[in-house]
Image (cartoon, grey):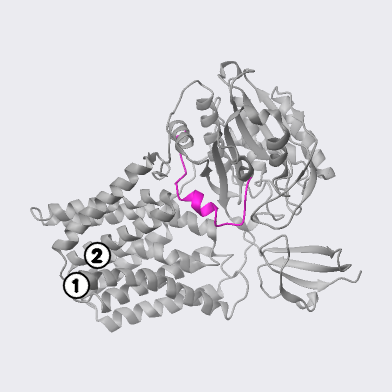
Amino acid sequence: MKRSGIAAALMLLALIAALSSKGLLVRLPEQPEVAPVHGFDAGRAVARLAYVLGDQRPHPVDSEANDAVRARLIAQLRDIGLNPRVTDDFACSSSKRSPAMSCAHVRNVIATMGPQTGKHLMLVSHYDSSPVGPGASDDGIGMAVMLETASKLPRDKLTQPVTLLFTDGEEAGLLGARAFLAKDPLANRVGTLLNFEARGVTGPAIMFETNTPNGAAIGLYKAAVDRPAANSLTADFAKLIPNSTDVEVFKARRDWTILNFAVIGNETRYHTPGDDLGALDRRSVQHMGDQALALATFATSGKHASAVGEHPYADLLGQGMVVMPLWASFATLGAAALLFVFIGWRRRRGLGRAALAVFAPIAGAAALAWLGKNAVGLVRTGEFWRGYPEVTALAVYVSTLLAALAALGWIARRSEIGTLRAAYWIVFLIIGGALSTLAPGASIFFLLPPLVAGLGMLAGKKWPRAERLASLLAFLLIFLSWGPLLHLSQILLDFDAAWIFAPIAAIIMLPALIEMAGLLRDIPRKLLLGGAAAVFVAAWALTAIVPAYTQDRKQAFGIEYLWDSTTGKAQWLIAHDGAELPEGFGALRKDVTVPYSMRKRWAAPTAW
């Protein structure tokens, strides 16, 4: 193989390695070795939580275990100098996401500090757990953060009241939140609400949801938080997952400013016995606590961060925020589109073929990833990616690379690199315009890279190297902004539909592959595509042999007892990931639908 071929192979490996390491762009702040005097202390927060959880038994709503947790929570509130009150209500659920209804006695715990007048800043978490897990993260992390934050607030300097609301019955259908909004007079005095949740046990505390329009919420967040983790696409993603938080109820109050936080790393422990204190990442507690304390301090200091309307936003690798009015984002997107209409006209010869070569791998990558994942599914049942999701992610990236190399090798074999560059950014902006129409928060991810690339193309007339340098810089910007987005999307949505991530990977890869086109053309096409196809097969074969589960990422499994009062019959239900069960479970009917969940069960009749 020529030196150029070796160089190209090494660059391709580096590209795959970079995508596989994108999670490093989403870093957690380290917990200080010495507990801060005035800052948030995650160690003490977890110690408070350990006391509240006691023996870490599951404590669902209206149970003796939940009564015990509530008593210890009240003791902690009194220990930090607050005088909590406990409500006693009966509430029922009603949600568009589920046809099932649940009702229960709920006992919210409420404590207020600061002045008696003014709009309240309200911090919210729920203290009940799912029926099967201790809830150290869901939602113990919220309790821990609120208790420690309340202990650090300077009560004599607060310019407005601060209320801690610990809701009950969240897991049974957001019951405590419904009772508070419907029956508690304090609901009419709330101005700003911070909700703290979890769908995992590690990772950054992402601010993933706001009220609409989001101007006031994002203005407050940007002004107060030093280590942000947020972007305006997360609210759209949140609608895709079958989970909800108390904010679903509270968003009915259009006059509230709302910020919703959650930790989502390692969702395999969510609603399981594995959601215990040992699994809860102290760095996640620190990150959520730092944001909570910063927001509460800023909001109650008399300072203001005024903003109106809707604002796309994104954090800059956790070091700062980019926020702009929606109109400005759309105007910038339009300006970039006009710039590439001009560039595309100047490079119109062969532009259609080049655009096809760009679009083909975006669609083809999804098809290859779907094919690979389903081929493995023929020999493996269940969520085989659960134990080592990074292996499945690698296979998706290799699928993307194969699709891109095939398109560049067959369709764009004779296309000029300058034409391919223009075609890529035109397709990129078309996708950006379409996606932004459906999800306006996406627009902020389509602005800077094409502007940098386009200005470089214009400058290339006088300084030929400018175009290549600008194209490389634009790729770097794509990787730094889209890499974290891809990483968090994979955590949030999981790999059941792994093909979804392939088009995003293609968008990230293509600018780099276009810059490598000269080197790639030096490699015989059959050798290049044959090698990529072999790696494709090997990558998916690897997903077929690695363990499906690990000690840290276990198989989803639950047993339920369902009684049908109409027929007078009962049955055992098994909720799991679809993998075959040991012979001892006997014959089970598969794909049984239940009214209270979107996940189908396996069922067997009971003996009584």
Magenta extent: 225-245
Secondary structure mostly seen in magenta is loop
Marks 1 & 2, CB-CB < 8 Å contact = yes
Which residue is at a point 70% across and 22% down the rendered structure image? 81
Look at mark 2 in the image and give the residue it sits on: 423
Q: Earlier in the sequence, mark 1 or mark 2?
A: 1
x then y, percent, for residue 601: 72, 69
Identity, as a three-letter code, of the amino acid under mark 1 = Ser
x then y, percent, for residue 439: 44, 53
Left or right: residue 17 compared with residue 60: left
298 shown above or below 92: above
Closer to the camera: disc 1 or disc 2? 2
Which residue is at a point 66% across and 44% down the rendered structure image? 139
- Tell me the crowding category of disc 2: few under 14, some 14 to 19, or many 20 or more residues within 10 angstroms, Cα based: many
Identity, as a three-letter code, of the amino acid under mark 2 = Ala
Q: Secondary structure at mark 2?
A: helix
- Tell me the crowding category of disc 1: few under 14, some 14 to 19, or many 20 or more residues within 10 angstroms, Cα based: some
x then y, percent, for residue 497: 52, 67
Query: Looking at the figure, which quarter contains the C terminus?
Result: bottom right
Residue 20 part of the magenta-drawn span: no
Left or right: residue 93 compared with residue 321: right
579 or 39, which lies in front? 579
